[in-house]
Image: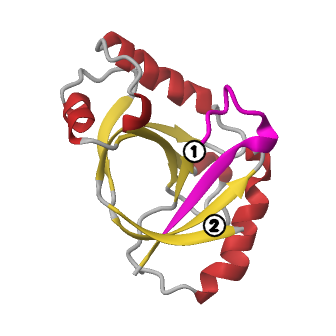
Amino acid sequence: MEQRIETREPRVALTYRLTGDYSAINYDEAWNAMWQCCQENQIGDCGCDVEYLSTYLDDPVTTPAAERRCDVCIAALTDRIADTLRGMTLAHGVRLSTLPGGRWMVFTHRGPYDTLGATYGEIYGTVMPTLDLDPERPAPLEKYVTDPYSTAPADLVTEIWIAIK
């Protein structure tokens, strides 16, 4: 598994909250709500000026499945897009938020989303105990590097971002 350290700036993002078992919630509900909100605000494809992420707010080991929260996000990579997002009329459960910046350990997962659990197991079981973690660290992020609608599941690339000191 590839890993590297990166520094991120805080990023303005559209977010949509989902609740439930992370492996069973309907992520399309969130993406569709955000895309509908963008269309209603006459915002077309932002292309490479945004990134697509999810942030998992609850530990799946200690939080009952029905209570787990996940924010699905479209984050701005440029000031122009950030200003556009700030100016939107929000609807359909879409919120505006700021994703945290800081130093992050980034792990690259290659393959279908349904195999992410094994990658998380390796990260949390083997790698995390060796890291200098920020005790106030924000929730981990998943960044979807490839488009799941045009990429074969075996070729998907997902980055898992864990905040460090």
Name the front one of labels 1 and 2.
1
- Kindly identify which residue carries mark 1: 145
Task: For marks 1 and 2, give the CA distance.
Answer: 29 Å
**Which corner quadrant of the image does residue 13 belong to?**
top left
The residue under the point 63% across, 67% down is 62
Closer to the camera, 44 or 63? 44
Please give left or right for residue 26 compared with residue 117 in the image. Answer: left
Tag 1: Cα neighbours inside 10 Å, few (<14), some, or many (≥20)? some
Closer to the camera, 104 or 65? 104
Circle 1 sits in a helix, a strand or a loop, which is it? loop
Which amino acid type is shown beneath numbered disc 2? Answer: Thr
Q: Is residue 5 magenta?
A: no
Closer to the camera, 146 or 12? 146
- Kindly identify which residue carries mark 2: 62
Quarter placement of the C terminus: bottom left
Measured from the top left, where is residue 121 in percent x and y? 74, 68
Tag 2: Cα neighbours inside 10 Å, few (<14), some, or many (≥20)? few
The residue under the point 63% across, 46% down is 66
In the image, which residues are magenta?
146-162
Closer to the camera, 67 or 106? 106
When the figure is inspected, residue 98 is found, relative to residue 59, above or below; the finding is above
**Which corner quadrant of the image does residue 131 belong to?**
bottom right
